[in-house]
């Protein structure tokens, strides 16, 4: 094995302009390459030296966040220094291995959690600013300033610590390679990242220009709109106090709450305008326009997803952050974009239009189209399939509406008599009750939909779901019992619902609860124990808290086990479909949860084939009535 770590400099700020612009910019250069073969000392390569012969063999090359190192090697090392190209199948990403076991995905935190012998040097940020960003600590002749020689030596030591820390993290992990199937998935994800997403950057610039001018003008109107009560959009308390004087008390002005307010049609015009200004100034969608403009390279955006970003194995977003796009849409994006070009949008509301047009900025290049599809109710049908809820599976296969099915049971009416309001309650019940929510939890869930429920209605919905799909609660508690038993009796395997549970110790003696899915993929839970939870004994484990992004203890409830299993299986089905699409020549540009999006020559686009391939079922899911539905368009849109 060989561990590598580059230190580089560039005029490009990678945090603003993204990895592809950084890797390919002429100013980007290598300062030092630190490398370590097996347990040898760390050695260094500097520009001007011969290519290290240690790389001429067949050793596997490791890096933490391999995509960055691979980009530097092949865009700078190859093009500037004549190195041989580094092939991806020779490499392994230590960050990906950490992710595979639910560990932190940055070097410093992974080293701390694994308690390795060498930790990441905390002085790195200061030194990176000194040598990696202009003016690079150089004199007029391009040499390191004599006054900075001490810091330069510290910088090289910093690189050495990163190489050694990566080495010891690798040694502390349960294994040193992704298994073949996961390695194929990592490579597929990398291929998608470097294929890039086509974006309409000129349109994005115009939309941002018009919207920011509108917001700036209206921000200056705040004192007039509020009778002098509010002078800046950042004065949240003053806005709330002013709203109360109008008879509209408000507890929160969070993004979600603002959207609820803006959906109302009973507000005074001045209040609507103030809330629009507040929403506009904090719009994540405006940030996406800025990101498109900053990161676009040759009409595309790159590195938009992180392999195994979530514990279930699902990707998480980077770059354009496609996993949290606004839900808003417009019926005719072309007309709406034209309105920004001819400024007629100023007679309407460019803030709301800008929010609704983010998806449309993904636009196929000339001669190509966007083809996309997503699975129909995949979590619901997977839950029914794993629980062997036979009648529900049959009705789904026959294309009955599961939301109406639940409403039929809840309201004791026939399928054809279900009203729109009853179906909506059935929909919330199907989407909210599958993973163990009780009445209180369901009330909070409904509130996110903007629906206020009484405790009685919430209880009726929860009970209705559990009665109609009575095998689902059995599944929750069977998983809980298996997990507890596996922790209590290490090395013994317990089985339920085609999942197996065993507590093992890795090569370093660390305990893991290993749960093997019907797909054959294992999920790992670090240092499991039995502790008293809210409703009695529960398994605790350590993982990255998705809210605080810190390493923390987590209590695993019956519903949480079920959610992990179903979402993980959904991920495995998604990748099975992705491979089928790739093999058939559909170049995937991104995926969002249960949706796959490709850009393909318009003559190749075949929606029926695309949907069929995506809904392919592996042998472990035989009998699962999986289906996908999609569209072909010149732009990405809400399905």
Image (tube, grey):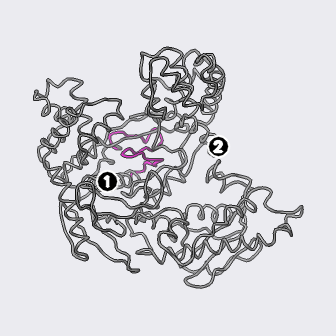
Does 466 sit left or right of 67 as displayed?
A: left
Residue at 32% in and 29% down = 451
Label 2 neighbourhood size at 10 Å, few (<14), some (14-19), many (20+)?
A: some
Place residue 5 in its image quadrant.
bottom right
**In x, y percent, where is residue 593?**
39, 46
Task: Tell which tag, 2 or 1, sits nearer the viewer.
Answer: 2
Q: Earlier in the sequence, mark 2 or mark 1?
A: 2
Judging depth in this view, the residue of 194 and 271 nearest the camera is 271
Q: Which residue is tagged 2? A: 294
Label 1 neighbourhood size at 10 Å, few (<14), some (14-19), many (20+)?
A: many
**Does the magenta-highlighted stretch encompass residue 589?**
yes
Q: Tell me the SS state at disc 2.
A: helix
Residue at 45% in and 50% down = 547
Q: Is residue 477 above or below residue 500?
A: above
**In x, y percent, where is residue 516?**
27, 65
Q: Tell me the SS state at disc 1.
A: helix
Q: Which residue is tagged 1? A: 573
Q: Is residue 444 above or below residue 568?
A: above
Place residue 108 in its image quadrant.
bottom right
**In x, y percent, where is residue 505?**
34, 77
Residue at 46% in and 36% down = 636
**In x, y percent, where is residue 246?**
48, 17
Looking at the rendering, the stretch of residues picked out in magenta corresponds to: 584-609
């Amino acid at each position: 094995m060989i561990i590598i770590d580059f230190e580089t400099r560039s005029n490009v700020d990678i945090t603003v302009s993204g990895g592809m612009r950084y890797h390919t910019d002429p100013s980007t250069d290598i300062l030092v390459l630190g490398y370590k073969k097996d347990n040898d000392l760390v050695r260094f390569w500097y520009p001007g030296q011969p290519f290290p012969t240690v790389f001429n063999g067949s050793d596997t090359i490791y890096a933490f966040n391999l995509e960055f190192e691979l980009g530097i090697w092949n865009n700078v090392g190859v093009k500037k220094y004549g190195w041989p190209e580094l092939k991806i199948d020779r490499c392994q990403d230590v960050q990906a291995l950490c992710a595979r076991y639910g560990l932190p995905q940055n070097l410093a935190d992974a080293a701390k959690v694994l308690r390795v012998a060498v930790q990441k040097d905390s002085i790195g940020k200061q030194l990176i600013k000194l040598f990696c960003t202009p003016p690079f600590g150089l004199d007029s002749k391009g040499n390191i300033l004599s006054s900075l020689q001490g810091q330069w030596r510290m910088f090289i030591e910093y690189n050495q610590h990163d190489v050694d820390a990566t080495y010891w993290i690798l040694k502390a992990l349960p294994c040193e390679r992704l298994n073949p199937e996961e390695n194929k998935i990592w490579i597929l994800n990398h291929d998608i990242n470097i294929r890039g997403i086509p974006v309409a950057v000129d349109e994005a610039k115009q939309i941002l220009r018009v919207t920011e001018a509108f917001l700036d003008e209206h921000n200056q109107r705040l004192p007039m709109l509020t009778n002098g009560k509010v002078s800046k959009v950042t004065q949240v308390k003053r806005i709330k106090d002013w709203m109360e004087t109008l008879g509209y008390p408000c507890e929160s002005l969070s993004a979600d709450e603002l959207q609820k307010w803006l959906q109302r049609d009973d507000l005074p015009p001045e209040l609507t305008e103030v809330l629009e200004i507040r929403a506009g100034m904090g719009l994540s969608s405006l940030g996406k326009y800025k990101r498109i403009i900053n990161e676009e390279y040759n009409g595309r955006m790159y590195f938009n997803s992180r392999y195994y970003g979530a514990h279930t194995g699902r990707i998480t977003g980077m770059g354009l952050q496609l996993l949290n796009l606004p839900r808003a849409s417009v019926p005719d994006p072309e007309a709406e974009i034209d309105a920004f070009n001819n400024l007629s949008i100023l007679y309407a509301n460019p803030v709301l239009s800008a929010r609704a047009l983010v998806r449309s900025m993904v636009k196929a290049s000339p001669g190509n189209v966007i083809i996309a599809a997503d699975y129909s109710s995949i979590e619901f049908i997977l839950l029914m399939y794993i629980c062997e809820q036979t009648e529900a599976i049959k009705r789904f296969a026959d294309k009955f509406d599961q939301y109406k099915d639940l409403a039929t049971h809840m309201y004791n009416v026939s399928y054809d008599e279900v009203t729109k309001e009853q179906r909506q309650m059935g929909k919330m019940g199907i989407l909210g009750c599958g993973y163990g929510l009780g009445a209180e939890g369901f009330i909070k869930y409904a509130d996110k939909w903007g629906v206020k429920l009484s405790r009685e209605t919430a209880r009726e919905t929860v009970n209705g779901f559990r009665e109609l799909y009575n095998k689902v609660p059995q599944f929750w508690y069977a998983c809980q019992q298996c997990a507890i038993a596996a922790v209590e009796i290490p090395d013994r395997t317990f089985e339920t619902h085609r999942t197996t549970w065993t507590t093992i110790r890795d090569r370093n003696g660390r305990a893991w609860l290993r749960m093997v899915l019907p797909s054959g993929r294992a999920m790992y839970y670090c240092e499991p124990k039995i502790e008293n939870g809210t409703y009695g004994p529960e398994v605790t484990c350590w993982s990255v808290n998705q809210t605080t992004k810190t390493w923390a203890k987590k209590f695993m409830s019956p519903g949480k086990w079920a959610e992990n299993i179903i979402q993980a299986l959904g991920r495995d089905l998604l990748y099975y479909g992705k491979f089928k699409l790739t093999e058939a020549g559909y170049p995937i540009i991104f995926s969002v949860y249960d949706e796959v999006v490709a850009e393909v020559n318009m003559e190749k686009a075949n929606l029926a084939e695309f949907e069929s391939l995506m809904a392919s079922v592996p042998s472990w899911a035989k009998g699962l009535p999986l289906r996908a539905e999609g569209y072909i368009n010149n732009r990405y849109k809400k399905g």
